[in-house]
Amino acid sequence: MQIQQLYDDFALLDDWEDKYRYLIELGRGLEPLPDAERNADNKVSGCTSQVWLWTRVEDGTAPRLRFVGDSDAHIVKGLVAVVLTLFDGKTATEIAGIDPEAAFRRLDLAAHLSQQRSNGLRSMVARIKADARKVLAAGTEA
C-alpha cells in the first residue's frame, strides 16, 4: 500500500470508530513476523504495548530497508502498518527525508490516539530513523 491510498481510505471513513476498525484491518494484513524475530533486539522500547520491528537491508548500490513489525495490541498493530506504509522499501536517504508527523497530522492520528499510543508511534519512527542512520553511517548507500 502507498501512503496516498491510506490517505484516501481514511478520508472515505466518516467517524473514528470506522477508522479504528480500519486500523485493525491494516494490522491483520501485515506480513507475519517470524517467531525468531520476537526478541529483545527487535522490541521497540517506549511502547506501552509490545511492539517488535525487524529491519532487513536489501543489497544494492542504494540498499532499501525492509521492515516487518507486529504488536500484541490490535490498534497498535494497525499503527505499525501505518508506519510501515511510510517507510518500508525506502532507501536510508529517503527515510531520512520523510516527515512522519505530517502524515500523522493528515490522518488526524494525534487527535484520536492516547498519549501512550502517540509515544509508541514516535518510538517506532525513532527506531526506523536510527536504523536508516546506521546504514548511512556504514556508507552502504550512495
Image (cartoon, helix red, strand yellow):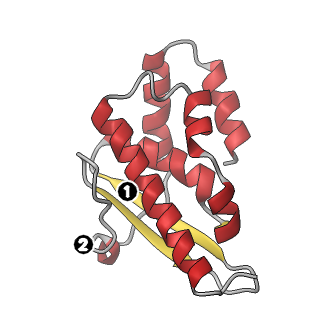
- State the residue at coordinates (34%, 42%): 119
Judge depth for marks 1 and 2 and give the one in front: 2
Amino acid tagged 2: Ala
- State the residue at coordinates (68%, 79%): 63
Mark 1, residue position: 70
Q: Which mark is residue 40?
A: 2
Q: Residues within 10 Å of mark 1 (few under 14, many from 20)?
A: many
Observer-nearest of 70 and 141: 141
Classify residue 64 by image quadrant. Answer: bottom right
Q: Is residue 103 above or below residue 34?
A: above
Q: In the drawing, does residue 101 fall left or right of residue 114?
A: right
Quadrant of the rendering where the C terminus is positioned: bottom right
Mark 1 vs mark 2, CA separation in Å: 13 Å
Whether residue 77 is visible to the viewer of this picture, yes or no, is no
Q: Position of residue 17 (x, y in %)?
A: 42, 18
Q: Residues within 10 Å of mark 2 (few under 14, many from 20)?
A: few
Q: Position of residue 133 (x, y in %)?
A: 55, 72
